[in-house]
Amino acid sequence: MEIKQQAKKMRDALQQFIYKVIQPIICGMIRIGITPNVVTTLGFLGNLTGAVLLIYAGTRHAVPPFALIGWAGGVILCSSLFDMMDGQVARIGGMASTFGAMYDSVLDRYSELVTLGGICFCLIQHDYLAGTVLTFAALVGSLMVSYVRARAEGLGLECKIGFMQRPERVVLTSVGLLACGITGSCFPALSFDPMLILIVPMGFIAIFANLTAFARIGYSRRQLMNKQ
């Protein structure tokens, strides 16, 4: 329990630091009339661009895909900032809306689908079957974490528990892509396959995202039983 509390404190501190860094950008967006939904859409388009780079990397069988994988990771990491900025633009600019919250959640799911789908395609095209299976399991777990929370909230429950939530998944995915791309491009003579730097985080997400989904199911069940 103490480790979880420390991890939460570190995460919150990092989040507040990032908010301070991007605050001038947020204020500038508000001044020129950019709405939260536009910011959300830009974030999704960035993730879609990263997925396209990964698909293109999968089609290039004659050359190593690491440079494109690295670029995809960088694009997806930068796009994740938009996921933080849309909420801030809505709150600070007084533009929060129920539809905006729904729109943000829907595009978050699409972003994860296209990103992990792009990784699956890239891995299977380069004959990494085990890595593809792990990434598909990560995709399933990522969707189920959000789905269980949505169903619980539809029943009037609050269900935000679990370790592998969206920020952790985004960081692991984008940093894994970026590190894999840089390592594979800059150090081609390594004694191990640089693609493992991407596959290992996918396995980590696959395990802990699905554990988080099941933990939320159990937590919701206990809450419902206590209401009876």
Image (spheres, helix red, strand yellow):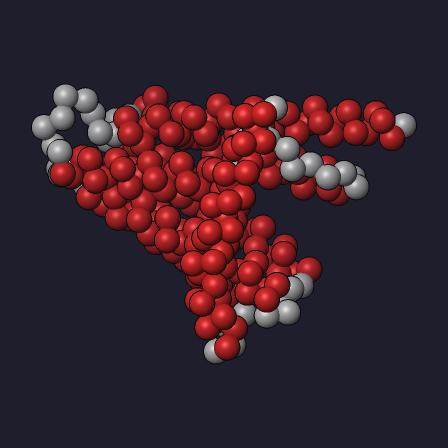
Residue 218, horizontal then vertical, whole percent? 70, 24
Location of residue 132 by image quarter: top left
At x 64%, y 33%, the residue is 161
Check the image and report above or below for 34 versus 208.
Answer: below
Location of residue 119 by image quarter: top left
Figure quadrant of the C terminus: top right
At x 50%, y 77%, the residue is 31
Q: Taking 93 as reference, is 219 left or right?
A: right
Figure quadrant of the N terminus: top right
Q: Taking 95 as reference, is 116 left or right?
A: left
Check the image and report above or below for 89 versus 14.
Answer: below
At x 12%, y 32%, the residue is 188
Residue 141 seen = no
* Numbered marks: total: 0
Q: Residue furthest right?
A: 228
At x 65%, y 37%, the residue is 160
Check the image and report above or below for 49 versus 63.
Answer: below
Q: Taking 33 as reference, is 57 left or right?
A: left
* Relative depth, front residue between 25 and 32: 25
Residue 13, horizontal then vertical, whole percent? 51, 45
Residue 177 seen = yes
Residue 180, horizontal then vertical, whole percent? 25, 35
* Relative depth, front residue between 59 and 31: 31
Q: Residue furthest left?
A: 189
